[in-house]
Amino acid sequence: MTASTASTVLVVDDERTLARAIKAYLTESGYGAEVAHDAESALTMLGSTRPDVVFTDVRLPGMNGIELLKKIREFDPAISVVVMTAHGSIEGAVEAVKLGAFDYVKKPIDLDELKLLADRARENTLLRQELSYYRRRESSREMPFADVVGESPVMKALLDKARQIAALDETPPVLITGETGTGKGLVARTIHASGDRSDKPFIEVNCTALPASLMEAELFGHERGAFTDAKESKVGLFEAAEGGFIFLDEIGDVELALQGKLLRAIEDRVVRRVGGVRDRKIDVRILSATNRDLEQEVERDRFRRDLFFRLAVIPLRLPPLRERGNDVLILADHYLRRFSVKYGKDVRRIGAEARQLMLNYPWPGNVRELSHVIERAVLWSKGQELGPDHLSLTRPVEAAERSGGQAVRDSGAQPVPGADRASGLDAAAPDRLTPDRLTAGMTLDQWEKSMLEQALRDSAGNQTRAAQQLGISRDALRYRMKKYRIGDR
């Protein structure tokens, strides 16, 4: 069986003819092979080559093979090291195995035997890497903040606050704000997982996904016969979270009529089921998140001022990825390792040009977009390094335009043929907001809202025609109108 071309062997031997012969044979067998003639050169090559397997002679000029083995184990214990030894130095080979070498092979070298040993050693490396991944994953459960990746000052400050919150015996309500895709849910789950109530429930509620007519019954429960389909009593999500946390994601989308009942549940720690006559005491901690500016919503009378202040006892703002500097590269490497293991690939690094492209890209979808970009790149890659073409990143305005198209796909609607032409969204109309006329500093949400308003103006408020112009379904249009509060005034 031919080895994957993504698997690399480093041969360390000062016998240059032998080293070249081994390299040529392994290359023909499908391996990527490199050669070093002393231990010092081999150590220099480890970072750039990232070999799966190292074949090293015991006797080398300068640092010997045993010392090299120790250094490789310090660098990455997952790398399988095979020592090559002459008959007279078998003791050295035995010592190397005791120190962690995968195996040893005697000189003169049988190349077929060497190939079989390389295959076995490579499998051993992959198993070690997988075991290391699962150990890190278990460790991250013991140290939950390990999942929140970032070294920028703004993230360090946020994580410091989150750790302090998690350490509190009585956690006051926490409001997590930030753009879509910044990781608000991850921070909420991490606060729960790292506190004294980590063994208690964590109930996540997507306030956007719940229809307004059902939200009260879902949150607070209902009694039998409370409405037509209420054939039996049901515990609400607040009661289900007893002793733990309830996370109200996209809290800014809750209808005003329900906000007063939410306020009472948070302030008095009681809920009353729909159709019920008695209050039920609850012991839950409240985490909430939104991508809206709730202070602005309060000023527009779209969100209750008293509920806002009650939810935001402790505010946490998650910065967009474009404000986090080199965190984008740290996160990219983190996802590279995760998805390489997930898909059984041997992608080791992201090239310099691709890294610079990621630093320059504005990431309108934030960390979620970055995760999807790296996952896709790893899935389709065939080598050890990701380049710019693997990332499929575009210019910022193209990214905004593409995201608008993604919204169409997410809605489940089929694109309308010629929708771009039908919408009339072209550069010929000076008053239209087209992707190439994006205002500096405008967010993707602001751009999408403006496009919706433009389509509604063009269609004189006819939602069916506006949806056709945008190439989305009428339900998708109405959902976005509700999301951006279009037509509420």
Image (cartoon, rainbow, N blue to C red):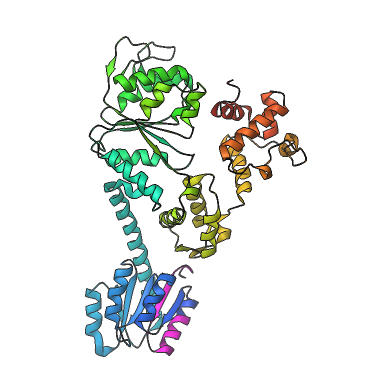
Task: Please provide percent x and percent y for residue 110.
Answer: 38, 84
| Image point (61%, 29%), residue name | 477
Q: Check the image and name the residue furthest to the front.
A: 299
| Image point (68%, 27%), residue name | 456
Task: Please provide percent x and percent y for residue 64.
Answer: 29, 83
| Image point (21%, 84%), residue name | 91
Q: Is residue 6 magenta?
A: yes
**In screen coordinates, is 36 left or right of 390?**
left
Instruction: Looking at the picture, tell me which residue is in the foreground, 231 or 293.
Output: 293
Q: Is residue 166 above or below residue 81?
A: above
**Residue 455 seen anywhere in this rendered image of the structure:** yes
Residue interval drawn in magenta:
1-24
Task: Please provide percent x and percent y for residue 331.
Answer: 43, 53
Instruction: Looking at the picture, tell me which residue is in the foreground, 100 or 163.
Output: 163
Q: Is residue 62 above or below residue 10?
A: below
Task: Please provide percent x and percent y for residue 265.
Answer: 33, 20
Instruction: Looking at the picture, tell me which residue is in the foreground, 353 or 30.
Output: 353
Q: Quadrant of residue 442?
A: top right
Q: Is residue 292 above or below residue 384?
A: above
Q: Quadrant of residue 163?
A: top left
